[in-house]
Amino acid sequence: MMESMVNGGFGNNPSIRPMMNRRLFIKRLISQMGVVMTMRAHPLFPQTGSSPSGSWIGGLHYRPLNGASLRDLAQRKRHHGPDGLFLNPMGAKNHRNLFQLLNWKLLQTNPYKKYFSEEPVKQIRIDWEEVTRHKGVSVTFLKHAGVIIKDGDTRLCVDPIFEDISFIIKDFTPITPDSLKAPPMNHVLITHGHYDHLDRKSLSSFSKETHVISPPGYRNLFSSLGLNRSTSLDWYEAYDDGATEITCLPCNHWTMRNPLEGPNRALWGAFLIRTKSGMTIFISGDSAYFDGFEQIGSEYDIDLAIFNIGAYEPRWFMAPSHMNPSEVVTAFQEIKAKKLMAVHWGTFRLGDEPVHFPPLHLKEELKKRGIADCLIDLGHGETRLLS
């Protein structure tokens, strides 16, 4: 199903490098700016819709709902804007912009830079025999935010990324060719359209019979890859095949693929997966912290919460889009899940923090709050048998 990818090593062989000249320099500069502007690396300048009234902490809208019903907000389509665009009614009002991006990248000192030499490169090897042999529920951490959930003979893959996303972003977790030969997937879940979550090349490696589930706005992209079996789920809508139920839930984020078209032409979301064995798994997707986690926790009985955690520094820039470890632990406690797993770290350095720092900081925070035993500590390529 997942055919071996060609290694994206363009430019590594000196014998094929063209001579640098002014035209090539300008072309490469434009290309690199295009990579930045199309969000191949990280959320650079989130743009959101208007927000309900609520309390502000440090300029961030941490409690935008302020007691309002998240489900009611979704049912009233407060996240649907004009001309087919989408809004983030929980988002920060102070948008990040290109000037703030350049300020961050060119003028600010990264206090974590001294630790970059310690960043590990780990080649991923996945024991598919172990995954296939197990009859109950298992979860496998692929790379970045990619996860495979197996429940008996049903297999789901979330936000698959199998190689690098840009020639200017280092991949710290390359996958061995054998590890790409995974068993067929019944469903592929896409949380949103940022390039580190929706990768065309990775999606094109799936069987054309694979069923793709996402928020609205991506069907044409899937069809262009020959993936014509797709289901769009708005917030609180569910897909049920009689064995597995998958619900799309709100999260505090945004999306963009083409800066010329602008942001939020498709929706973003979290997922709640009810397996046929009875286990319930929450997939956060990318999200800033907000008070919606309390409501999700009061409505659903969650066994495992898989939170995205990387790309959280510097906070003045990243907080409107991504949670830091402290916020993840708070969200985990509010969602009242039994177990916690963290992804979206270790593969691409998208924030100031080194790629190996997020799980270290998360463990420190869990220990500080006395709930370290709640963590399912998985590295890339590793599998945990859950039932």
Image (cartoon, helix red, strand yellow):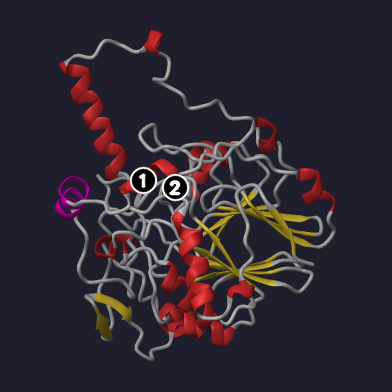
Residue sitting at x 43%, y 52%: 193
Q: Which residues are magenta?
A: 98-107
Query: Whole-percent x and y of residue 174?
Result: 55, 36
Magenta span main SS: helix
Mark 1 lies on a secondary structure that is: loop
Image quarter of the N terminus = top right
Q: Is residue 323 left or right of residue 178?
A: left
Q: Residue furthest bottom?
A: 67
Q: Quadrant of residue 93?
A: bottom left
The circle drawn on residue 41 is 1
Query: Whole-percent x and y of residue 333?
Result: 52, 81
Q: Earlier in the sequence, mark 1 or mark 2?
A: 1
Residue sitting at x 51%, y 60%: 359
Q: Which residue is mark 2?
A: 196
Out of 242 and 11, give the one closest to the viewer: 11
**How many neighbours does mark 1 have within 10 angstroms: few (below 14), some (14-19), or many (20 or more)?**
many
The circle drawn on residue 137 is none
Q: Can residue 319 be spotted in the picture?
A: yes
135 drawn magenta: no
